[in-house]
Image: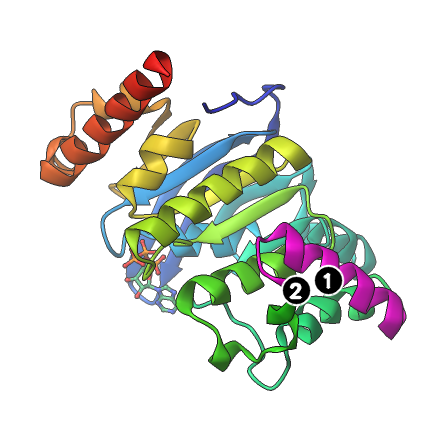
């Protein structure tokens, strides 16, 4: 079962944000709160700016207007050393994994420990081995190069690297895209376990209805250049909007909802 977030304070606050590329306005007057300890899924049609929102929150994209506060700090207004200290509290898993292809998995995971935590090579290697295990990979995977891994293992390796610096917030951009259903379900359960064990806050950009139904506490829907609704799944699914109706009540949405109900019944009868 999902555990609800313990403390309902906002760890991320996005206020009145505008993002624009040339004449294309992606976000206009966008507001979003993310609560400490929750798993929040960001959904929306293709091109609604889910990845841009993630990049804006982690400071990789400067909005044209508005403010983003993470842990109460405006990242873009901080002096470099303070900004780096805040950034160390983020773990980011980008869409394609973004591992260095010329480094082994263990070296990829050790890199932030050497570069940002100032560890020596030996300590970093020991800690990297722990993170690799935490991400559910066998120890042998540490010696492999990203090109030698399956898609699911690449995601786990990238997750191990995202966990390297013991982040408070995990940002995941379409973590289950390209995985088979069994691999995707296992990855979802891993995220849930890590959230519960480590007290992480998890921000997931996803199209995956199974992820949304099985591990998400709240869902934020991007539409009309803003967050149309940010609430629990039942409230979002009942929201009166054409895209939401099609997404949550179309065949795939119904199948995901039924699978979760069936799993709940099995648990009750066990
Ligand atoms: N650096 C950039 N320069 C110009 N346009 C950009 C840039 N980054 C994003 N965009 C545009 O912003 C829009 C939103 O992009 P984004 O990748 O956030 O969408 P998305 O909701 O994540 O889509 P998808 O679900 O297809 O991955 C797109 O039209 C994209 O082309």
Q: Is residue 263 above or below residue 49?
A: above
- Disc assigned to residue 129: 1
Q: Is residue 132 magenta?
A: yes
- Disc assigned to residue 66: none
Q: Mark 2 points at which residue?
A: 139
Q: Is residue 257 left or right of residue 67?
A: left
Q: In this view, does 151 lie to the left or right of 93?
A: left
Looking at the picture, how far across and down is residue 96, in whole percent? Answer: 43, 68
Kindly identify the residue that appears in the image at 75 percent across and 58 percent down: 84
Kindly identify the residue that appears in the image at 16 percent across and 34 percent down: 255
Is disc 1 in contact with disc 2, using a CB cutoff of under 8 Å? Answer: yes
- Disc 2 is placed on an element classified as helix
Q: Is residue 5 above or below residue 94?
A: above
Q: Locate residue 1: give its quadrant.
A: top left
Total numbered labels: 2
Q: Does the magenta stretch include residue 249?
A: no
Q: Which range is magenta? A: 120-138
How packed is label 2: few (under 14 Cα within 10 Å), some, or many (20 or more)? few
Is any atom of residue 200 visible in this view? yes
- What colour scheme was applied to this rendering of the protein? rainbow
Looking at the picture, how far across and down is residue 179, in whole percent? Answer: 34, 59
Camera-nearest label, 1 or 2: 2
Looking at the picture, how far across and down is residue 248, in whole percent? Answer: 19, 33
Looking at the picture, how far across and down is residue 125, in whole percent? Answer: 79, 68
How packed is label 1: few (under 14 Cα within 10 Å), some, or many (20 or more)? many
């Amino acid at each position: 079962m999902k555990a609800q977030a313990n403390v309902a304070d906002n760890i991320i606050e996005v206020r009145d944000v505008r993002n624009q590329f040339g004449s294309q306005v992606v976000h206009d007057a966008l507001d979003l709160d993310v609560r400490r300890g929750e798993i929040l899924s960001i959904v929306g049609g293709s091109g609604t700016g889910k990845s841009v929102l993630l990049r804006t929150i982690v400071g990789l994209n400067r909005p044209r207007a508005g403010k983003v506060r993470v842990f109460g700090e405006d990242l873009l207004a901080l002096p470099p050393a303070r900004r780096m200290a805040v950034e160390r509290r983020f773990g980011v898993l980008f869409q394609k994994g973004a591992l260095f292809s010329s480094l082994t998995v263990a070296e990829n995971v050790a890199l932030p420990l050497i570069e940002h935590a100032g560890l020596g090579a030996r300590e970093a290697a020991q800690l990297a081995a722990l993170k690799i295990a935490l991400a559910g990979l066998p120890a042998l995977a540490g010696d492999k190069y990203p090109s030698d891994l399956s898609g699911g293992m690449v995601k786990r390796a990238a997750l191990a690297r995202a966990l390297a610096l013991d982040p408070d917030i995990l940002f995941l951009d379409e973590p289950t895209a390209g995985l088979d259903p069994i691999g995707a379900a296992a990855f979802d359960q891993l995220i849930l376990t890590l959230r519960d064990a480590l007290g992480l806050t998890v921000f997931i950009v996803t199209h995956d209805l199974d992820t949304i139904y099985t591990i998400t506490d709240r869902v934020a829907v991007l539409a009309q250049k803003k967050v149309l609704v940010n609430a629990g799944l039942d409230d979002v699914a009942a929201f009166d909007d054409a895209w939401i109706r099609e997404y949550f009540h179309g065949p795939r949405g119904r199948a995901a909802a039924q699978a979760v109900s069936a799993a709940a019944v099995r648990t009750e009868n066990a």
